[in-house]
Image: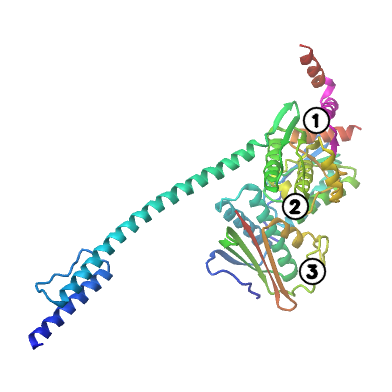
């Protein structure tokens, strides 16, 4: 799996494999709870939960599953919730194209990645064909 | 598929169907609900459907698409769909996501939604 | 120098070393005591003086530090108050009021930045849901200019209101803002705009009249005006 550079000061809140559609529902419920605990407002809670839901669906559809990791800590001088989705799927051939509004290669409707990016404060994606994809989204208070 | 998966109840009042979504749906459940409602429209000859989403804390692009798809499908079956009670945070997130759901009728609450359907059916 | 002298000097130097290391470790109450009067005594006294000075300075800096910490706490508290007041002010600066059956008005005055527009948008949408009003008028007569971000937030508000089931009317767009919006290439054609707050109000009342059976609301308005 492709690991992104991370800060050792970040506290790990949760990390578990994602195998079924129920895991998606469970994961987004725990993201909302952590966002609530972090003191985020209702709109920001909804933004981060929705963004994560988009990422997890992509992961489930294209890679058949993966890992979700929830951390908290300082990001760019802000107290943040940091969520990383890692998979060992086929990877994305053309990241630029995948980030375009309305583009889809499968059953999705093409709002997944660019939409998720608009909902968060920081978005990082790394993908390697044949190796997998890792996406990290950050929302700060 | 799990046997104990809860079905979302569909209630019929006069010419209309009322559906209240109160669980965080996964994708398959959402699609299942779409089919279930369309079948119910055909079976009961309902003229309109009220879908209450006031307890939904999140609508992502998939659920959003299922909802607007259902409105178009019902419409070609000659039934109107009104989405009722969306939360402000959900509406803001949907717009930012890029889903403005054009063509989907919405109402602030059940009462207003019912009035809307009645007006549509009577004209 | 005889041997006893040397042993004696050695002992005294060792004593000095002991005292110095104790002082370095933080024990400032120790001083070198000596029964002799010779060349070493001067050094011993000088060291004692140095320890005195050090003690004094240290006490002074500790006191300063305590004062600074206290001030810092005060400043942090003041900052909290300022932030809180800013938040309060932001909410106060965009009051949403129900002016009629079914009609909300949000008069916006002053320069809009992205954050203020965001707070305003959330307030308005929450008020729409709480009151069940299906028409909201966003009057921006008092807004001198808008930038792309603010214009987009306004657009977003109107779209989000529609998703809730309410119609949002924007009134009082100044020539300057109209020019900016068109120059920025922002498409407001899907938004219902009215020239003045009065025009928006008339539109909203007419809609009410159609919506609520039998002109009750408008009649009521006229009656109240004649009384």
Q: Which mark is residue C71?
A: none
Q: Secondary structure at mark 3?
A: helix
> CA separation, marks 1 and 3?
45 Å
User: Is C23 located above or below residue B118 in the figure?
Assistant: below
Judge whether residue C211 can be spotted in this image: no
Q: State the residue at coordinates (20%, 74%).
A: C43
Give the colour scheme of this rendering: rainbow
Residue at the top extreme, as displayed:
C227
Q: Secondary structure at mark 1?
A: helix
Question: Circle 2 marks a residue in which chain?
Answer: B
> CA separation, marks 2 and 1?
28 Å
For disc 1, the marked residue is: C197
Q: Are marks 1 and 3 on the same chain?
A: no
Pinpoint residue C90: horizontal percent, then vertical percent: 63, 40
Pinpoint residue B78: horizontal percent, then vertical percent: 90, 43
> CA separation, marks 3 and 2?
20 Å
Q: Are marks 2 and 1 on the same chain?
A: no
- Residue range in magenta is C192-215
For disc 2, the marked residue is: B96
Q: Secondary structure at mark 2?
A: helix
Pinpoint residue B48: horizontal percent, then vertical percent: 84, 40
């Amino acid at each position: 799996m492709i690991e992104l550079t991370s800060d050792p000061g970040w506290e790990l809140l949760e990390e578990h494999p994602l195998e079924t559609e129920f895991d998606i529902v469970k994961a987004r419920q725990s993201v909302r709870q952590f966002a609530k605990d972090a003191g985020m407002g209702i709109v920001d809670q909804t933004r981060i939960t929705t963004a994560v839901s988009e990422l997890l669906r992509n992961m489930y559809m294209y890679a058949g599953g993966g890992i979700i990791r929830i951390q908290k800590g300082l990001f760019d001088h802000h107290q943040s919730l940091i969520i990383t989705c890692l998979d060992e799927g086929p990877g994305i051939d053309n990241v630029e194209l995948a980030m375009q509004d309305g583009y889809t290669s499968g059953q999705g409707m093409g709002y997944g990645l660019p939409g998720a990016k608009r909902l968060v404060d920081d978005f990082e994606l790394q993908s390697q064909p044949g190796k997998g994809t890792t996406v990290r989204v950050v929302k700060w208070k | 598929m799990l046997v104990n998966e809860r079905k979302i109840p569909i209630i019929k009042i006069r010419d209309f169907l009322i559906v209240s979504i109160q669980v965080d749906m996964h994708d398959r459940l959402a699609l299942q609900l779409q089919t279930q409602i369309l079948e119910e429209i055909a079976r009961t000859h309902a003229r309109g459907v009220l879908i209450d989403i006031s307890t939904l804390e999140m609508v992502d692009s998939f659920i959003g698409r299922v909802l607007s798809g259902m409105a178009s499908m019902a419409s070609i079956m000659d039934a109107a769909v009104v989405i009722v009670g969306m939360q402000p945070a959900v509406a803001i997130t949907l717009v930012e996501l890029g889903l403005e759901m054009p063509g989907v009728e919405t109402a602030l609450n059940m009462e207003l939604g019912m009035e809307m359907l009645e007006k549509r059916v009577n004209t | 120098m005889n041997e006893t002298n040397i042993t004696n000097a050695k002992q005294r130097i060792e004593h000095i070393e002991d005292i110095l290391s104790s002082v370095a470790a933080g024990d400032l109450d120790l001083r070198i005591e000596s029964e002799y009067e010779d060349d070493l005594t001067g050094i011993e006294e000088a060291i004692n003086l140095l320890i005195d000075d050090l003690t004094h300075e240290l006490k002074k800096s500790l006191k300063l530090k305590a004062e600074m910490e206290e001030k810092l706490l005060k400043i942090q508290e003041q900052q909290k108050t300022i932030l809180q007041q800013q938040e309060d002010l932001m909410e106060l600066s965009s009051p949403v009021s129900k002016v009629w059956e079914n009609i909300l008005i949000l008069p916006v005055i002053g320069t809009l930045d992205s954050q203020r527009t965001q707070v305003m948008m959330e307030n308005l949408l929450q008020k729409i849901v709480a009151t069940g009003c299906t028409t909201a008028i966003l009057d921006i007569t008092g807004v001198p200019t808008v930038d792309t971000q603010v214009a987009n937030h306004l657009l977003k508000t109107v779209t989000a209101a529609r998703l809730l089931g309410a119609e949002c009317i924007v009134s009082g767009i100044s020539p300057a803002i109209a020019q900016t919006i068109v120059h920025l290439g922002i498409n407001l054609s899907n938004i219902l705009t009215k020239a003045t707050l009065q025009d928006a109000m008339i539109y909203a009342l007419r809609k009410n009249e159609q919506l609520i059976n039998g002109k009750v609301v408008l009649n009521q308005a006229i009656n109240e005006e004649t009384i």
